[in-house]
Amino acid sequence: MATFEKRTTQDGKIVWRVKVRRRGYPPQTATFTKLSKARKWAHVTEGAVLEGRRFTPREAKRHTLADLIERYIRDVLPHKRPKTVATQLGQLRWWQTQLGHYTLADVTPALITECRDTLKRTHTNATVNRYLAILSHAFTIAVREWQWCEDTPVHKVSKPREPRGRIRFLSNQERHRLLEECQKSRNPYLPTIVILAISTGARRGELLSLRWPDVDLKRAVLTFRETKNGETRTVPLTGYALAVLTQHAKIRRLNTTLVFPRQDKSDKPMSIREAFENAVKRAGIVDFHFHDLRHSAASYLAMNGASLMEIAEVLGHKTLSMVKRYAHLSEAHTRSVVERMNRAVFGEP
């Protein structure tokens, strides 16, 4: 299994290069100045191979975490959304400061756990998990594509428990007051945007980046291309929302494809943050943010009989975990489904 090779260095010194090979295992190599030490290393290494112990790849010893992060920033990060890039760049730089000098072979779950606990002192559990997620993805790329290491140590680090997602939706009275105040706003787009947010469950960024080629009034659908998960989503328009957007299309600006462009820069979307916050304040609504319009849409869907799968499809969630928070609102619908099944199986009581 072991082979020895005698070599002469440039300065005339004799060294022994030993290599241990076994099928199904990566070759192990080392260099010594004495043959006795080379034989001893070979003996220990052969025993480890026969026992089936794993070895750290050479690449994991050659590259530091700083090397991994720099390559990730250069090759992977630019393909993400600009807002995501800005956030994750700061997170990666933090990891680089904390552990960048370690080789990948020396970045252990224990080290990452210490950093996790440091983050927990000043950040929410949700934010800590985002830090862990970006480090985990960087290691995953290093394992799958670069072959710099065999596994990611982040998988062995437990994530802090996050609180249940916020559920804040507009009551009927709050919704009427908010829409009235939006109509009074100096921002001409605010009423239309708020109505679309409530009727489609779209995020603010999805609505503000919407372009006319993605608005099909004949088919009554909107296509959102710049979504949070990067996948295109089509949402139906109906009733009041369709009428409002149809009216808005009659006064659209012809020097831009944006549905809601800025007045001074046609290639930039309108900012509505201040106008919306003022409308909420005038309406006397407490503890309410624009994203809560999305929660309102999901809540209204649940209360009107939509299943969790249907809500997830409208909102663009890949799994049901994000929409389970609305399960209690669809209790009546769930009860009716169970009642229909029981009547079909057992007949009328």
Image: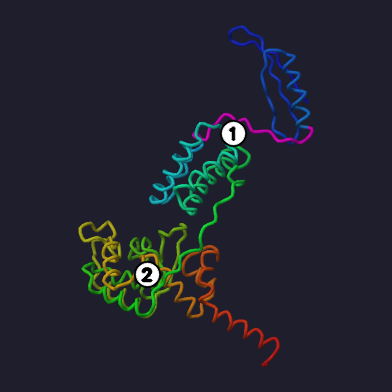
- Look at the image and give the residue range highlighted in magenta: 50-67
Mark 1 lies on a secondary structure that is helix
Q: Residue 106: which disc?
A: 1
User: Left of 15 or right of it: where is 204?
Assistant: left
Residue 207 location, x and y as percent?
35, 64
Depth check, mark 1 against mark 2: the one in front is 1
Residue 8 location, x and y as percent?
64, 10
Name the image quarter holding the N terminus.
top right
Mark 1 and mark 2 lie on one chain; the one further toward the N terminus is 1
Query: Does the magenta run of residues contain 59?
Result: yes
Query: Does the magenta run of residues contain 234?
Result: no
Examine the image and state in which quarter residue 52 appears. Answer: top right
User: Left of 340 or right of it: where is 51?
Assistant: right
Q: Amino acid at mark 1?
A: Asp
Q: Amino acid at mark 2?
A: Ala
Residue wearing tag 2: 197
Residue 305 location, x and y as percent?
51, 80
What residue do we see at 22% from left, 73% from top? Answer: 184
What residue do we see at 30% from left, 77% from top? Answer: 177
Q: Which residue, as the protein is rendered here, is positioned at the far top?
A: 12
Q: Residues within 10 Å of mark 2 (few under 14, many from 20)?
A: many
Name the image quarter holding the C terminus.
bottom right
Let me know if residue 254 appears in the view: yes
Q: Residue 29: which disc?
A: none
Real-space Cα separation, disc 1 to disc 2, in angstroms: 48 Å
Q: Which residue, as the protein is rendered here, is positioned at the far bottom?
A: 348
